[in-house]
Image (cartoon, rainbow, N blue to C red):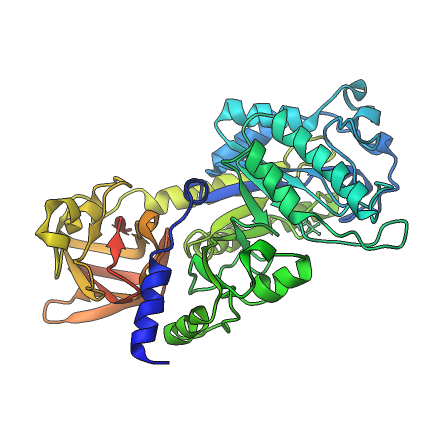
Amino acid sequence: MSNNHLTDIARRAARVTPAPRQLAWQQLEFTAFAHFGVNTFTDREWGDGTEDPRIFAPTALDAGQWVQTCRDAGMRMLILTAKHHDGFCLWPSRYTEHSVKNSPWRNGKGDVVREVADACREGGLRFGVYLSPWDRHEPTYGNSPAYNAHFKNQLRELLTEYGDIAEVWFDGACGEGPNGKRQVYDWPGYYALVRELQPDAVIFGCGPDVRWCGNEKGYASETLWSVVGLSVDLEHQVPNWEEYHRVIGSDPNYGTPVRAGATEDETLECLATAKHLLWYPAECDTSIRPGWFYHASQDEQVKSLEHLVDIYYQSVGRNAVLLLNVPPDQRGLMHENDAQRLRELRQTLDETFRVNLAQGKRARASNTRGALQEFAPERALDGDPRTYWTTDPDVTQASIEFDLGQPATFSRMLLQEHVAVGQRVAEYSLEAWDGADWAEVVRGTTIGYKKLDRFPATTTNRVRLNILSARDCPTLQAFGLY
Ligand code: FUL
């Protein structure tokens, strides 16, 4: 393909912007998942739907403790498994007997969804729901129209009776019902209901707002564009889980099948064949333990601090949102070992990012939009997410020199584009002045909402950030050295 074509598609992709709900979601950065239900009591990962509701008997459930644990970790949202594949509902749904209302917990008068939603609201966390379409208990499952109506009734309960919902998490798993037929999910109908009742909620997974990062290890790919190309028509977007995997989820670059490690030109060539360009940011879900549900046998297998720090850098630090699962135990509490590890993680991140050595320093850019103060490079140092540096239109390569005054030692860099106007930077490098010359410290590909780089400790009084290539004029909302 000619260069003009690539420039054209690059420009188009760079101008796709997030919906307000997607931007608000991205700004949460670090979020929590709580897998809780009958599996917590049967010590399984997947229930088959035959579980007796009476086994659901947490002895000391305290949603406030969950929220405190998440807050201490710096997480900003909690997503609860309101119903997992076993079909057991953590709220007293009117549409099934398979729920907390037939459990001994709170004498059958309890509602875990309500307690967690309320605790989140009180504690300043956003609240989200996981509702598994695959339901191994519900007799109508497999009778597609009947089950779709049932599922929408349950979804409506959750979206109307528990206040603001920030994210609706749809797992795409799908099986056969008792009639031997495979359920056909009414995805467009589910999405329409979410839009109608909770227009600010993002829909994850088999949904239009947030895509899966492609693994359950918590790692996003190094090059991560929030704009993808869809090779199917939007009306038919994600018609079923297989299609979703084929189109979106089977490759770490997503969208039109771009192979992992593809060059920017190869990626653009793929985008050029797409039917639609779409802002479709990535979420990394993983568990703090080997399983999604709590198992006492895994109490000593909580991920190490080093592992969690790594996950953080490779998810939040790679333009994705991290959704870390912390499964409540049979008491109905997040376990001490998990809580302790999360505090360690927060402490490490706080220590690392406490002082931005570039904050308030002088900066000089090779190009600034209209030479205006409004777009000066210092805007990347003012700590204000509404302001940013940018270049004149058509300038896609530029550099900013930061004068640190005194020699300073750092080993981490933070970069943020102003993604409200689109994602643009395709490659960048950081150089340090060694007294005689510039020496490269680190080089990276995409930035997006947030990029964190780690490198050996470097001491200098001057650094230079080079935007080596961009899909359109680059923006920089934040720059930090730590
Ligand atoms: C998967 C489910 O099958 C797992 O049990 C878990 O809920 C995970 C987050 O999604 O598809």
Q: Which residue is rendered at x = 46% and y = 73% of the image?
A: 261
Q: Which residue is rendered at x = 31% and y = 62% of the image?
A: 425
| Image coordinates for residue 361, horizontal then vertical, percent | 14, 47
- Which residue appears farthest toward the right when viewing the image? 179
Position above or below: 404 against 153: below
- Residue 122 in sight: yes
Answer with the quarter of the image where residue 1 lies: bottom left
Answer with the quarter of the image where residue 328 lies: top right
| Image coordinates for residue 326, horizontal then vertical, percent | 61, 42
Q: Which residue is rendered at x = 57% and y = 54% of the image?
A: 235
| Image coordinates for residue 422, horizontal then vertical, percent | 34, 53
| Image coordinates for residue 459, horizontal then vertical, percent | 21, 60
Figure label count: 0
- Which residue appears farthest toward the bottom when viewing the image? 1
182 or 135, nearer to the observer:
182
- The reply, left or right, for residue 313 in relation to residue 439 is right
- Residue 303 in sight: no
- The reply, left or right, for residue 472 in relation to residue 146 is left
Position above or below: 4 against 53: below
Answer with the quarter of the image where residue 150 lies: top right
Position above or below: 33 against 268: above
314 or 96, nearer to the observer:
96
